[in-house]
Amino acid sequence: RHDLAHDQVAHERRRRDRLGRRDHRMSVGVERRAAEAVQPRRVPVEIVGFGAPATRMKVEDLGYKCAWRQNPDGSLYLSDNGNLLLDLSFEAPLSHPEAVQEELIHLPGVVDTGFFFQLAGRILIGYPNGSFEVR
């Protein structure tokens, strides 16, 4: 089933390329992750190690629930850049995720967040029966 959906997505990419639409970005995923991609319930925030506890306190002062991402052995997870990841969790979909991004990105010690806006012109969603949908 997965292979069929993957083949259909690959076919859609080839068709797009044949039509000269290389300037369009596409996001590909499976059905169970589609809602999460649109409205995530957990978003990582990359934080510089120096002063990380103070940055976490600022995030918590803004009212966000968060926890340090950890490795299976319990040690703190480090990003490719050697920074810490603070996972923010949300109980409900955010009404203005762009505002949350702006608020967080301006805190001292925050490198970036896991919010991604306007990166894909179309989203391809694969279903267990092998079909897919273009949004």
Image (tube, rainbow, N blue to C red):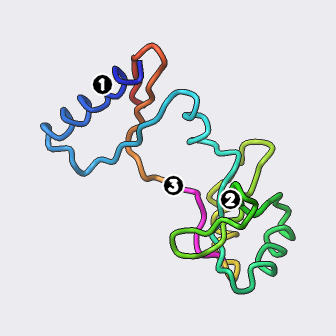
Q: Which residues are magenta?
A: 110-115
Residue 44 lies in quadrant: bottom right
Alpha carbon separation for disc pair 1 and 3: 25 Å
Find residue 85 and report its horizontal and vertical position in percent: 66, 66
Q: Amino acid at mark 2?
A: Asn
Query: How packed is label 3: few (under 14 Cα within 10 Å), some, or many (20 or more)?
Result: few
Secondary structure, magenta segment, majority class: strand
Residue lying at the far bottom of the rendered structure: 50
Could you tell me which quadrant the C terminus lies in?
top left
The residue to which callout 3 is attached is 117
Find residue 123 and report its horizontal and vertical position in percent: 42, 37
Alpha carbon separation for disc pair 2 and 1: 35 Å
From the viewer's perspective, tell me whether residue 81 is left or right of residue 131: right
| Dot in front, 3 or 2 | 2
The residue to which callout 1 is attached is 8
The residue to which callout 2 is attached is 71
From the viewer's perspective, tell me whether residue 28 is left or right of residue 86: left
**Residue appearing at x 30%, y 24% in the figure:** 8
**Residue appearing at x 29%, y 26% in the figure:** 7
State which tag comes first along the sequence, 3 or 2: 2
Q: Amino acid at mark 1?
A: Gln
